[in-house]
Image: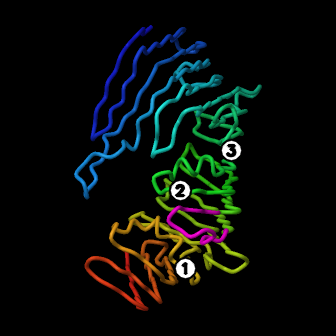
Amino acid sequence: KIDNLQLNYISRGRQITLQGLQLNGKNFIPGGAITLEFQTEFAVKEEAPVAPSTGQQTESPMAVSGHVQSSINLQVDDRFIPRSAQGEISIEKLLGRVAGESMEGFSALVKLDLSSSANGVSILKEAQAAIRRNGVVLTSLGATGPFDLARKEADLDVQIGPIRSNVLNVLFASKKLDFLDSSLSYVGHLSLVKGGKLLKADGRLEANPLNLASPQWPSGLWKPVSLTAEHSAEMDWIQHSMLLTKLNLDSTQQGKPLLKGSLSKPMLISWAENPPANERSDAADFSVRLYPVDMLPFVPLLGLPDDWKLASGILDATAKVVATDQGRNLTLDGHVGISGVALTASVLKLENTALIFDGKVAVK
């Protein structure tokens, strides 16, 4: 039992403080039913950066405090490997600001229910994390399915989101972006076999719409974007290789193509010294194209110096990654073109300028 412990950690401009920490545990024996209870008050603060123009400290990017509490029941085997677990962890009573956004009213709750079936296989009935504000769920993450810690095997369905503007606005508060009616979600499946040596992952990410506004833009400058990304991959730690069987990108803006990417065939990437012969040793490539797009809506994301003012510019780009020799040789060909550039700065001025960048990188 630990009662009323205080901890203080300082590193690289960040200070973490725990006060009134309490930890209670029971039945720490092999094959026992362990009970863990924990609670503490916490505070996290990052050192405020100095503004280059004035030499004065600005607002701290993170200064937040709150209360953490958890209660977990574990049934362990003779090797202390959990066979079942039920419990929850909550973060409440948040105060302060993160990236300029108030944390008041925010809370988080993590729930876990890992049960053992009649044949001894652990089933993850629920593993869910939810973020709330004033009691309203903003977004959540969850996973369910068979999960064997002892054998390091799993077969899980995963779902994230939808993540809407009330969460995205907090994450990107430093960029002063408003995500309006944006909605992001992910649905996927994870499979872990061969003692955790082979991981298979399939999934689909959707942003529909991705809609933005900023005080730095004229009203309506950004047009809503629809984005879909699909993937299917295998990571084999025994063969020291990764096989991409699907990687598709498809994005449109007002019904017009914005971004497209796809594989020509399954792509094997190996980092083994002497990989075995494999019928998938032919060259495979992943090609992606960014169709001509107005650069002005992306100005807040570019991080340009304060005295750089971009008035116009149209960006288009292409890239191709080619894998040969069973993925041990990778080649990247890229092209970036910017036309109609109008830029003013203290050191230069561009008017109706075209910039072209072509490059090729090989990795062996």
Asked whether the beta carbons under mark 3 and mark 2 sit within 8 Å of each other, the answer is no
- What span is colored magenta in the figure? 211-224
Location of mark 1 (residue): 294
Mark number, residue 236: 2
**Relative to 306, residue 235 above or below:** above
Question: How far is disc 1 from disc 2 in space, using C-alphas?
Answer: 41 Å
Left or right of 191? Residue 170 is left
Q: At label 1, which amino acid type do we have?
A: Asp
- Disc 1 or 2, which lies upstream in sequence? 2
Location of mark 3 (residue): 156
**Relative to 170, residue 310 above or below:** below
Residue 166 spot, x, y in % from top left = 62, 47
- Disc 3 or 1, which lies upstream in sequence? 3
Q: Nearer the viewer, mark 3 or mark 1?
A: 1
Residue 236 spot, x, y in % from top left = 53, 56
**Relative to 13, residue 222 above or below:** below
Check if residue 222 falls in the magenta segment. Answer: yes
Element type at mark 1: strand
- Look at the image and tell me in which quarter the C terminus lies: bottom left
Q: At label 3, which amino acid type do we have?
A: Leu
Element type at mark 3: strand
